[in-house]
Every structure is written in C-alpha cells, then in structure tokens.
C-alpha cells in the first residue's frame, strides 16, 4: 500500500461506497419483506403494561402544575383508581413527573380483597394483567400530539409508523373519520387507517395459509438469521 496512488485509493473507496449503498438498499428491502411476512402471519410484538418514557422524568417539576399531588395520598390514590381506563391513567401520568412516578408506583401495587369469602391479592388499579391489542390501541389513539409529525398510527398493526422509513412507501387505506373521538374498539382496527404493509397483507388474506405463503414467511425468517 506504500506505493498506492491516491487516485487509485479514491477510486476504490468510491466503488466500496457504491457497494455500501447497494447493500443498504438490499437490507431495507429485506426488512420490508420481513415486516410484510410478520403481518401475513398475524405476528405482533409482545404487548406489555405501559411504561412511562424516561424523558417525562427529566422535565423540571417546578414548571409543572399538579394539584392532584397536593391532595392527601389516600384521596389521590382513590382518584387514580377511579379513572375509567388504563389508557386515561397513562395520559394523566404523561402530564408531569410527579404523576408519572405515582402511576409507576400504583400500577405495581397489590391489595388484599375478599371474593366469595376467599382472600385474594389483586392489583390496586383495575387494569389487565395481560396486555393485548385492545389494551394497547386505546393508549396509542391518545398519543398523536405527543408523536413527531412523521409518525402515523396504523390501527391494524397497532403501532406508529415512521413515514420516512423506506418500508413505509405505498398507499394507506382506511378512513380516519371513522375513528374520531378516540375510537379504539375492534371495529376501529378494520375501518381505521392501515399502513401500506398491512394493506398488502390484507390483499393476500385469502392465500395467507397456503404453502406458498408459508414459504415466503420461511424465507423472511431465514434471511433474518444471517444478520
Ligand atoms: Zn400496519
């Protein structure tokens, strides 16, 4: 390399840069196929109890008003317990650091109660023990103002989609007007906006259990192992 001509090195670096770009494009394409395969299969991420993001705790509490925290602890806890849904509790928790801490504390709290003369340990906040699609969607529909402008909610795959990501190119279907007023029931997952990959998966729904579709899913999984 000591006699290498700078122009030759420059040329080779340019070839490598071009290979890198090809590789990135290919990776993105494979990722899109993997995402589509997961939708065809009906796979989804493991749904977990909502966790308040770290950045809420980094806010300056003195800039935030939280009259609820000034109430006696028992009264405040009762109010938290009376909020009708976990999604609404999460929204309150997102408004300030003190509420976020209270929510995180109360969501793990258990109390003793008596059911049919039997002593039982139950969650203090009435919330699902196992989270599913129908628990996650009500939280997501309350979040658009918290999300960056380039993220849009897909009601089918139950997540915010980054519109600038290469796998997001294509046409959305569904009607946002059908899911106004925080609608998040089962019907909303059918009539609400659906991302381009969910749209493609929907259009293949009649053949999703065929050997051909299984072969596509198998390939998507095989490639993943090489990364
Ligand atoms: Zn989707």
Image: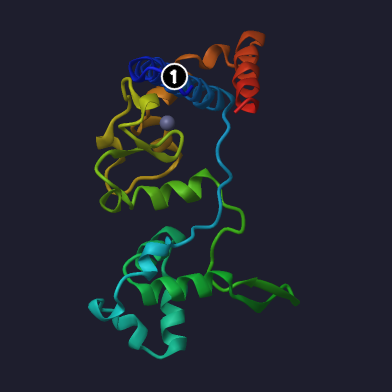
Q: x%, y% of residue 1?
A: 48, 22
Q: Judging from the image, what secondary structure is the residue with disc 1 in?
A: loop
| Residue 84 quadrant | bottom left
User: Residue 154: percent from the left, percent from the top?
Assistant: 38, 35
Task: Tell me if the residue at label 1 has its CB under 8 Å from ligand 1.
Answer: no
In the drawing, does residue 216 fall left or right of residue 147? right
* Image height of 125 relative to 150, above or below: below
Residue drawn at 42 percent across, 35 percent down? 189
Does 6 sit above or below residue 81?
above
Residue at 40% from the left image edge and 14% from the top image edge: 15
Give residue 59's quadrant in the image: bottom left
Image coords of residue 95 (percent x, y): 31, 68
* Frontmost residue, 116 versus 193: 193
Q: Does 176 appear above or below 60?
A: above
**Taking 64 as reference, is 11 above or below it?**
above
226 and 116: which is toward the camera: 226
Along the line of sight, which residue is nearer the eye, 210 or 64?
64
Looking at the rendering, the quadrant in which ligand 1 lies is: top left
Q: Position of residue 8 (x, y in %)?
A: 38, 14
Which residue bears the numbered disc 1?
A: 3
Q: Is the C terminus in the top left, top right, bottom left or bottom right quadrant?
A: top right
Left or right, residue 214 beside residue 145: right
Q: Could you tell me which residue is drawn at 60 percent across and 26 percent down?
A: 224
Estimate how packed mark 1 is, as few (under 14), some (14 to 19) or many (20 or more) residues with alpha carbons within 10 Å: few
Q: Is residue 185 left or right of residue 124?
A: left
């Amino acid at each position: 390399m000591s006699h290498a001509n700078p122009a030759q090195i420059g040329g080779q670096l340019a070839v490598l840069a071009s290979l890198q770009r090809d590789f990135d494009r290919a990776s993105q394409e494979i990722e899109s196929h993997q995402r589509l395969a997961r939708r065809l299969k009906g796979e989804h991420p493991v749904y977990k109890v909502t966790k308040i993001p770290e950045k809420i705790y980094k806010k300056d509490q003195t800039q935030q008003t939280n009259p609820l925290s000034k109430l006696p602890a028992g009264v405040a806890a009762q109010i938290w317990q009376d909020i009708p849904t976990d999604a609404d509790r999460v929204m309150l928790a997102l408004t300030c650091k003190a509420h976020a801490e209270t929510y995180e504390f109360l969501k793990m709290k258990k109390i003793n109660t008596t059911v049919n003369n039997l002593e039982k340990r139950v969650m203090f906040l009435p919330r699902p023990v196992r989270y599913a699609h129908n628990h996650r969607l009500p939280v997501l529909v309350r979040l658009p103002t918290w999300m960056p402008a380039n993220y849009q909610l897909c009601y089918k795959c139950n997540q915010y989609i980054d519109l600038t990501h290469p796998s997001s190119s294509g046409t959305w279907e569904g009607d946002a007007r059908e899911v106004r007023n925080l609608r998040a029931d089962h019907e909303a997952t059918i009539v609400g906006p659906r991302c381009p990959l969910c749209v493609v998966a929907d259009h293949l729904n009649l053949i999703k259990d065929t050997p051909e579709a299984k072969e596509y899913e198998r390939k998507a999984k095989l490639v993943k192992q090489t990364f």
